[in-house]
Amino acid sequence: MKPIKIENKINNFSQKINVDADKSISIRWTLFASQAIGKSTAYNLLMSEDVLCAIKCLKKLGIKVNLSRNKCEIFGNGVNGFKYKKNIILNAGNSGTLGRLILPLLIRSPVKIKLIGDKSLSKRDFTRIIDPLKKFGATFFPKKSSKIPIYIKGSDFIRPINYLENKGSAQCKSAVMLAALNAPGKTTIKAKKSRNHTENFFENLNIPIKIRKNKNFDFIEVQGQKNFSGLNYKIPGDISSSAFFIVLTILSKNSKLIIKNININPSRDGIIKILKKMGAKILYNNIKIYKGEKIADIHVESSKFIKSINCPTNLNSSAIDEFLIIFLVAAKANGVSYFSNLEELNQKESKRLNLGSKILNLMGIKTQLTNNSIKIYGKPDLQIKKKCIIKDYLGDHRIMAMCTIAALSLGGKWEIHNPDSINTSFPSFFKILKKNFGAKII
Ligand code: S3P
């Protein structure tokens, strides 16, 4: 697809919108449904490339899936119930969550299965998943590889493990929890705080799990080899997709926005806590609990004055996918903002800490970067005047969306390549921008 051009800011607005469904929940629902016995139905499943890749992988593994416009049915065959031919290849596309969460479901496979992905996923670290899965008893080829393409072969002699997750990675924690479904006896995990959707799925599905929490870590015990029946789910909106419109509102003049029915699970809403500390006017309304997730409408207004922040590192995991768009707010803050302990940001779809800093520099913002921190020298009067060309960013959907929001709220003449990258997570992004905000994007 050819690059987009944005040369006009948007006018002030007062809007009410829905965004696409939660990606973390959508992918997890497909995977859990594939391990259940019988039918699971999801309404409002995210129809993005990452989720469609998950469905394709499950179909290759012999799972029946009926997909229609607003409904998806998956017919699981129980834990380790996949039925497939020899020499199959699973393609996780751009999705770290899919690549890392499907491997644990294959640790009893009698034959080798190949996992591949796109250029970005092929650069990402898989040792964080390979190492614990080897402890369960799986084997990987080539033996010393840390990246995909990789082959996994399972074993009949899977054993439970004790595992320390100290990166604050929900993908690592979830991979071990899913592998534990295949292991006899008790797997124990000490996990630095991270999003807890997988734990919520275990509880909703009545899979034996015990969770003890302290300030920084959760202690999780899972009993494996228990079958469970299907789970129907109405998937709420994604806070990571909402984040772009929240920041668009904060940075635009005299504007207001309501985003309906968003998953504001406290292990995901770090962006709201951070933006409020920076003085943003954000409220939750119609709060309810659904399947252990906290759902609300988000109300946000423009900010006349943005404070700089020394961002508390205990919020890092709950805002991990939102730092790029938070950096944009820091660019317009009064003073120097500081974000640290963010080494995981360079492990995402692109090296987001480095690229985020580069983009701010291109916008005329001074930064000071280390391998895990960034200082952003905010300019409250920031108005971009120059030409900004964004390409060579590994088609990272969140870089693309960050730049689009910068263009529409701060000005400048932007040319952004690979706009279709947004289809991995938020296919309605441009449609909403044009329809609800009158964005001029050519
Ligand atoms: C995700 C966890 C996070 C996040 C990713 C989705 C998940 O990754 O960045 O977009 O659904 O579990 P890490 O677990 O690597 O931090």
Image (cartoon, grey):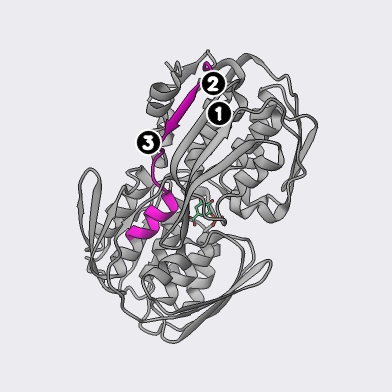
The residue drawn where x is 29% and y is 55% is: 42
Left or right of 154 in this view: 401 = right
The quadrant the N terminus occupies is top left
Tell me the amino acid under the disc marked 2.
Leu
Badge 3 or badge 1: first in the primary sequence:
1
Q: Is residue 301 above or below residue 314?
A: above
Tell me the amino acid under the disc marked 1.
Leu
Q: Which residue is mark 1?
A: 248
Q: Nearer the viewer, mark 2 or mark 1?
A: 1
Task: Return the x and y of residue 389 as percentages of the image width and height.
Answer: 56, 21
Secondary element at image label 1: helix
Task: Tell me whether the residue at label 2 lies in contact with that at label 1, contact meaning CB atoms closer than 8 angstroms.
Answer: yes
Q: Is residue 17 magenta?
A: yes
Label 1 near ligand 1 (CB < 8 Å)? no
Q: Is residue 309 above or below residue 156?
A: above
Q: Is residue 375 above or below residue 273?
A: above
Question: Is residue 245 among what the camera can see?
Answer: yes
Left or right of 384 in this view: 96 = left
Span colored in magenta? 10-30
Q: Which residue is mark 2?
A: 408
Label 3 near ligand 1 (CB < 8 Å)? no
Secondary element at image label 3: loop
Task: Tell me whether the residue at label 3 lies in contact with that at label 1, contact meaning CB atoms closer than 8 angstroms.
Answer: no
Q: Residues within 10 Å of mark 3 (few under 14, many from 20)?
A: some
The residue drawn where x is 37% and y is 36% is: 427
Tell me the amino acid under the disc marked 3.
Pro
Q: Which residue is mark 3?
A: 427
Q: CA distance from mark 3 to mark 1?
A: 18 Å
Secondary element at image label 2: helix
